Image (cartoon, grey):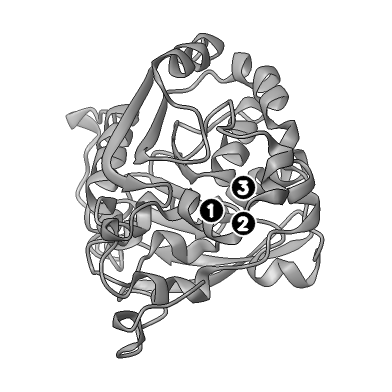
Amino acid sequence: MSVSRTDRRTPLPTHSPGVRPLLLEAAGLTLSGLLAEPADGPPRATVVAVHGGGMRAGYFDGQADADLSLLTLAARLGFTVLALDRPGYGHSAQQIPEGMTLDEQAAVLSAALDAFAGRYPVGRGFLLLAHSYGGKLALTTVARTPGVLALDASGVGHRYAFEPAERQRLRRHLEWERNWGPLGLYPPGTFRAAEPLVAPTPERERAEVPLWPQQFEELAPRIDIPLRLTFAEYEGWWRHEEPDIAEMVSRLGKAPVLRVEHQPDAGHNISLGRAARCYHLRALAFFEECLPAPARTDPAEVRAPTRNATNGEAP
């Protein structure tokens, strides 16, 4: 990745204030990631953010501008956010340098949700927010594992805008353009800040790229939760014209809510661009709509805490 002179100025922090790294044991792997929690009480729900190919969890905590971070924004709005390094990235790359298939990663992600719920309050449940290859993983997971409340995915479709075999022949600058689009979509410092986020795509993951259109055909009819899909204005990897969207929607007939939106002034890597805050707010608003209503308490059952209650908790 080339870095402009503007991007070479003062060093940037590795993560935002209030965001901390964590390790999570799941399905025999140690997954790394980032965690942000609400400062003023238990979470409304927990957003699990799943990054794309060749990136890491910090994709959702952009450092070029304070408005980019999904983690800090969502935590201020009352959500816990867990951004995980997918299997084969971050800490787990030492254990499985060749990576895992989508099915294998889906099993690990499901186990990670259970492991996280055993250690942290999750509020009313889990919501998945995913990008690119992470969107493939999220779709695979919700098709096979019940319990997720809703899914918001960006930068993932069902038909490539190129033949997968062509990707091997793409010149580096053309692949870069597909990932980023026009440079003006990103604040100064973006590409320097993104350097620590870039990671090699594991071999087993890369080998599955041509299989996705057929995998989607098999998975789509089983997705039965609210779903929101966003395509950037300058999306270069996926077909997203009206006929393509209509075809994709026709495969997702079980989703009780299905929205397909286009994000203006954005490239494939939406969460690192100037449009990130707008996209994140829309995703969180969608999640808010999908939350189950809180359980109502009968006023007759409300009791004052006893004297030996501590830290605001009942004994």
263 over 225 or under it: above or below = below
Cα separation between marks 2 and 3: 42 Å
Q: Which is more toward the observer, 78 or 180?
A: 180
Tell me, for residue 144, which label it has, or none.
none
Amino acid identity at mark 3: Asp
Could you tell whether 190 is left or right of 225 in the image?
left
* Residue toward you, 57 or 149: 57
Q: Position of residue 314 (x, y in %)?
A: 33, 55
The quadrant in which the C terminus is found is bottom left
Label at residue 114? 3
Q: Real-space Cα distance between discs 3 and 1? A: 40 Å
Specify few, some or many for label 2: CA neighbours under 10 Å numbering under 14, 14-19, or 20 or more. few
Residue 85 seen in the figure:
no
Q: Position of residue 269 (x, y in %)?
A: 42, 52
**Label annotation for residue 174:** 1
Q: Residue at x 74, y 40 (%)?
A: 165
Q: Residue at x 51, y 62 (%)?
A: 57
Identify the secondary structure beneath mark 1: helix
Q: Residues within 10 Å of mark 1 (few under 14, many from 20)?
A: few
Tell which of 14 and 200 is nearer to you: 200
In the rendered structure, which amino acid carries the disc numbered 2? Arg
Disc 2 marks which residue? 171
Q: Residue at x 31, y 47 (%)?
A: 266
Q: Residues within 10 Å of mark 3 (few under 14, many from 20)?
A: few
What x and y, as percent, mark residue 284? 29, 41
Q: Decide: marks 2, 1 in contact (CB < 8 A)?
A: yes
Residue in the foreground of this view, choosing between 130 and 260 = 260
